[in-house]
């Protein structure tokens, strides 16, 4: 684009030359004054910039149409590039295989809400939990969001889809008697998992406890520097004080492993492990426990009994590696309710609304009732023997029949 002045012309001797981006043709137009020519030149420049942007977008759109990205290829690139944890990749591939079976050959950009609803329907026909269904759809959404982030896809066609919230399946943690029975019947490496898990509250698995090394166990200062799981923690490790009763066990295990040159705290055949499910099931069977208890329940036991014992939520959350108390308030509300009553009863009767004797008797009975309810929550309702049932039957009034 340029402006040329022709002095030999009688009129419109200021001529603007430009080339159309869309057609590629050359054009020119004459003006009476230089100002008019410059104004037109500026307007044409703005138009040409917009035309270039439109052409770039059209080109990108055509390239995307030519290079069709299927669900299969996107998931494959996502697992090989975006993720690094082997266990996460293994579990993700297992869940993603069901997505691939249903619409793996489909173009990602052609996915619709009806496809997701149809997938949910088929998964429910297989009696799968809502949490499992949500995890599988979330893997697909995370992969698409990753594709958008790196410029592989222009948008996420599944944006705006809201999944049904699953019902929380709250399993009671092992009671002290159950924990002791499992510990006594456990294999040597499982004994370590139980002792550290129930007394320190780490995540039971490769993300934390199975990564723990002896160099992170400071027996002189009674502190375990537990590796933090990759869940947005600001630090790589967190300090957990060691319970006095656990110190002798850790010392003996450390001496035993140092003699063999073993670095990891949890090992089997001198090698670190990634799962303890098999040995856990064996210990449950030997202990005669039939109800559902998983190794992760040791972490729940730590939280439950710490809170019921009067520990502050902020301290428990910090020891467990949570950012704040939100997770504890959601998961362990049944354990916190008892503390609410104790907090109210701890308030003195400043207005003396109740006589002293009655006030003391009422406070004592409520605290006793609160403790009994807490025990029922942990250990279940009391079980009466045949003698108690017979004795109770004698106290009942005779039947009219």
Image (tube, rainbow, N blue to C red):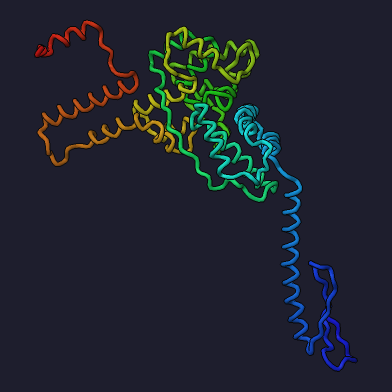
Q: Quadrant of the N terminus?
A: bottom right
x 27%, y 24%: residue: 373
Tell me where residue 225 appears, x and y as whole percent. 54, 27
x 75%, y 64%: residue: 52
273 left or right of 331? right
Quadrant assignment, res 297: top left
Task: Check the image and report above or below for 258 versus 101.
Answer: above
x 53%, y 48%: residue: 160
In the foreground, 104 or 149: 104
x 60%, y 47%: residue: 157
In the foreground, 38 or 302: 38
Tell me where residue 399 appears, x and y as whole percent. 11, 13
In the foreground, 390 or 103: 103
Quadrant assignment, res 116: top right
148 left or right of 169? right
26 left or right of 161? right
Task: Check the image and report above or below for 151 versus 78.
Answer: below
Tell me where residue 113 appears, x and y as whole percent. 56, 44
Residue 78 appears in view: no
- Residue located farthest toward the right when viewing the structure as drawn: 8
Residue 29 appears in view: yes
Task: Check the image and report above or below for 380 versus 256.
Answer: below
Q: Quadrant of the C terminus?
A: top left
């Amino acid at each position: 684009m340029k402006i040329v002045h022709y002095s030999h012309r009688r009129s419109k001797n200021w001529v603007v030359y430009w080339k159309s981006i869309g057609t590629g043709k050359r054009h020119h137009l004459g003006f009476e004054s230089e100002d008019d020519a410059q104004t037109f030149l500026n307007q044409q420049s703005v138009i040409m910039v917009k035309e270039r942007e439109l052409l770039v977008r059209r080109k990108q759109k055509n390239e995307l149409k030519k290079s069709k990205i299927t669900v299969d290829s996107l998931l494959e690139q996502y697992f090989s590039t975006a993720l690094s944890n082997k266990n996460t990749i293994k579990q993700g591939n297992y869940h993603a295989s069901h997505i691939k079976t249903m619409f793996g050959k489909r173009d990602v950009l052609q996915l619709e809400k009806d496809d997701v609803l149809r997938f949910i329907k088929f998964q429910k026909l297989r009696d799968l939990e809502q949490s499992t269904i949500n995890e599988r759809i979330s893997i697909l959404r995370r992969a698409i969001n990753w594709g958008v982030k790196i410029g592989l896809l222009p948008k996420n066609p599944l944006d705006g889809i809201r999944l049904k919230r699953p019902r929380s399946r709250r399993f009671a943690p092992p009671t002290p008697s159950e924990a002791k029975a499992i510990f006594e019947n456990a294999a040597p490496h499982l004994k370590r998992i139980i002792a550290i898990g129930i007394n320190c509250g780490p995540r039971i698995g490769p993300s934390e406890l199975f990564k723990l090394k002896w160099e992170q166990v400071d027996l002189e200062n009674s502190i375990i520097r537990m590796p933090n799981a990759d869940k947005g923690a600001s630090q790589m490790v967190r300090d957990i004080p060691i319970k006095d009763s656990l110190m002798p066990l850790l010392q003996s295990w450390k001496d035993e492993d140092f003699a063999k040159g073993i670095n990891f705290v949890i090992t089997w055949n001198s090698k670190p492990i990634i799962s303890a499910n098999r040995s856990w099931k064996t210990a449950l069977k030997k202990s005669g426990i039939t109800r559902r208890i998983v190794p992760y329940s040791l972490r729940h036991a730590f939280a439950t009994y710490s809170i019921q014992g009067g520990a502050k939520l902020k301290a428990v959350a910090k020891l467990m590696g949570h950012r704040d108390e939100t997770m504890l308030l959601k998961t362990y509300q049944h354990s916190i309710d008892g503390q609410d009553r104790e907090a109210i009863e701890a308030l003195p009767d400043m207005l003396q609304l109740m006589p002293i004797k009655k006030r003391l008797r009422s406070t004592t009975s409520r605290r006793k009732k609160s403790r009994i309810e807490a025990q029922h929550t942990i250990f279940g309702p009391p079980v009466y023997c045949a003698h108690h049932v017979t004795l109770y039957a004698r106290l009942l009034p005779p039947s009219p029949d």
